[in-house]
Image: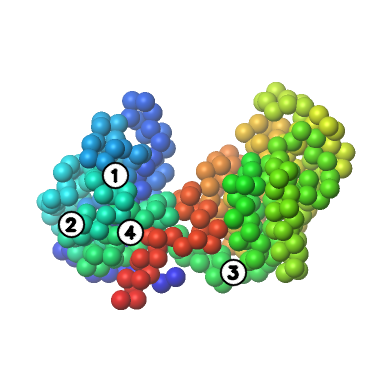
Amino acid sequence: MHVLKLTDLDLAGKRVFIRADLNVPQNADGSIVDDTRIRATVPGIRAALSAGAAVMVTSHLGRPAEGACRPEDSLAPMAKRLAELLGCPVPLRTGWTEGVEVAPGEVVLLENCRCNKGEKKNDDALARKLAALCDIYANDAFGTAHRAEATTHAMAKYAPVACAGPLMAAEIEALTRCFLNPARPLVAIVAGAKVSTKLTILESLAAKVDQLVVGGGILNTFVLASGTQIGKSLAEPDLVAAANKVMAAVFAKGGSVPLPIDVVTAKALSKDAAATIKPAGEVAADDMILDIGPQSAAAIEAIIAKAGTVVWNGPLGVFEFGQFGEGTRRVAEAIAASKAYSIAGGGETLAAIAKYGVTDRISYISTGGGAFLEFLEGKTLPAIAVLEQRAKA
């Protein structure tokens, strides 16, 4: 993937429009719960300001009705936090589609772009109007890269120059490294509640990886497909054939899909439930499988230790409850200790990484949820595709 990068361009005196992702969780009073996405946007803004650009930044927040911006839809809290992080004023501008006044060395935040009519529909007329506001358009919002909207896609077609901000460029580099020319063996760890939500991801990865590790409720369906009983564990019996097809595809390439040797079970799913470790073949009819056992974790650790590249999406068990989190903890620490290039993404995955204190030992942590998953599925991400097209022009 080749795209122009904001940091490689001459920005002095230029009007730079940065599409950021400031869609952060908030409390009922509007205060910010987690400013990770805001902090991730700062390097791009700071680079443009330092180069002497006049900087305009916008983002979506939630799903407002187009044409109306309610108080709860406003980016005002994000403007305040950006000002704190940048150490300079960040005024919030409304009605900005008709024009924006900003001088070189200054930055303004443009109110919630999804309040503009035509944003969600990727309207060409709106995109042309917005593109006329700037000399350089930079998309630094990987989390929205799977959405074709006016400020993520169409605007990039019409801006004089279209490029990737530092965050977007880093995401593209990390994902490219994992899938276009990965160090082998390539190991993918995919977990979650249901096979149905990640079936296309599993099918896509089966054709690319050397080992495919599945976990969570997904694993139960694969265990069922192998003919082993899973008690009353969460599973999708109607997708047993699909699970077998995924395993066959990996096996055909000489790869493996390790099934559990032992599991951690309970009679109910609760924070007080008693956890029992037992062989995978001895799950009782009233048991629920809620984590992998220590022998199973050791087998996955051995796979990770030999990996050249590791892609991780999803915890291995119900890690929110300590007695069912050991499998996820051991896998997280194995990835952190590995010499392999590792990339992790997805909300629950990031929560697990933070819980077990391995954040700074994962090679790259993706900021995208849906975008990361769609990339794993092998889908084309519109916001990246248009930047590639512009780079060729």
- Between discs 3 and 1, the one toward the N terminus: 1
Residue type highlighted by circle 2: Lys
Q: Is residue 48 visible?
A: no
User: 357 or 10: which is nearer to us?
Assistant: 10
Query: Callout 1, which amino acid?
Result: Arg
The circle drawn on residue 153 is 4
Report helix, strand or loop for mark 1: helix
Residue at the far front in the pictured view: 238
The residue under label 2 is 129
How far is disc 3 from disc 2 in space, using C-alphas?
41 Å
Q: Residues within 10 Å of mark 4 (few under 14, many from 20)?
A: many
Residue 221 position by quadrant: top right
In the picture, the disc for residue 182 is: 3
Q: CA distance from mark 4 to mark 2?
A: 14 Å
Residue at 33%, 59% in the rendered image? 153
- Name which of mark 4 and mark 2 comes first in the sequence: 2
On screen, residue 388 above or below 53: below
Q: CA distance from mark 3 to mark 4?
A: 28 Å
Q: Disc 3 on helix, strand or loop?
A: loop
Bin the neighbour count of mark 3 within 10 Å (Cα to Cα): few under 14, some 14-19, many 20 and up.
Answer: some
Q: CA distance from mark 3 to mark 1?
A: 37 Å
Badge 1: how crowded within 10 Å, few (<14), some, or many (20+)?
Answer: many
Residue type at numbered disc 3: Pro
Instruction: Work out whether mark 2 precedes mark 1 in sequence or the reverse, and give the earlier one.
Output: 1
